[in-house]
Amino acid sequence: MRNRSYFIAGGGTGGHVFPALAVAKALQELDPQTEIFFVGTPTGLENKIVPQAGFRLFLLPVGKLNFKGRWLEKMTTLARLPWALFLSAR
């Protein structure tokens, strides 16, 4: 069987991180040679939980859009999206 690599994005809260970790562990149980990489943000819960679980985490410099007020932060997040897209494609 050839080596497979998977990128998993799901973070911010435990409701996303823990199921993503369960999927990653299940994939590795099916094929121990499988490489799993996570994609997240520096401010999300995944920043602590994923490395502790032994997986590599790639961080993208984006912020939140789903909160009330703080228009300057939302505009900053929107301005960073092209750079984050470039980094994720790379």
Image: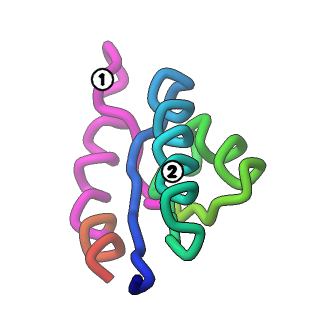
Direction top: furthest residue:
68
SS for callout 1: loop
Characterize the local packing of mark 1: few (<14), some (14-19) or many (20 or more) Cα atoms within 10 angstroms.
few
Quadrant in the rendering for residue 63: top left
Instruction: From the viewer's side, name the closer residue of 68 and 7.
Output: 7
Q: Tag 2: residue type?
A: Ala
Where residue 67 appears, as percent x and y from the top left, is 34, 18
In 3D space, how far apart are the residues under numbered discs 1 and 2 (Cα atoms)?
27 Å
Work out whether 49 lies above or below 56: above
Q: For the point 32% across and 13% down, which residue is it?
A: 68
Q: Tag 1: residue type?
A: Asn
The mark that comes first in sequence, 1 or 2, is 2
Give the residues in magenta: 60-83
Where residue 64 appears, as percent x and y from the top left, is 37, 34
Q: For the point 35% across and 75% down, which residue is it?
A: 87
Q: From the image, which quarter does the C terminus lie in?
A: bottom left
Image-based side of 84 in relation to 33, left or right: left
Task: Determine if the magenta segment contains residue 75.
Answer: yes
Q: For the point 48% across and 21% down, which residue is it?
A: 15
Q: Which mark is residue 66?
A: 1
Work out whether 47 lies above or below 71: below
Where residue 60 appears, as percent x and y from the top left, is 44, 60
Quadrant in the rendering for residue 86: bottom left
Characterize the local packing of mark 2: few (<14), some (14-19) or many (20 or more) Cα atoms within 10 angstroms.
many
Instruction: From the viewer's side, name the closer residue of 19 and 10.
Output: 19
Q: Which mark is residue 42?
A: none
Instruction: From the viewer's side, name the closer residue of 54 and 42.
Output: 54
Task: Determine if the magenta segment contains residue 81.
Answer: yes
Residue under circle 2? 24
Nearer mark to the viewer, of 1 and 2: 2
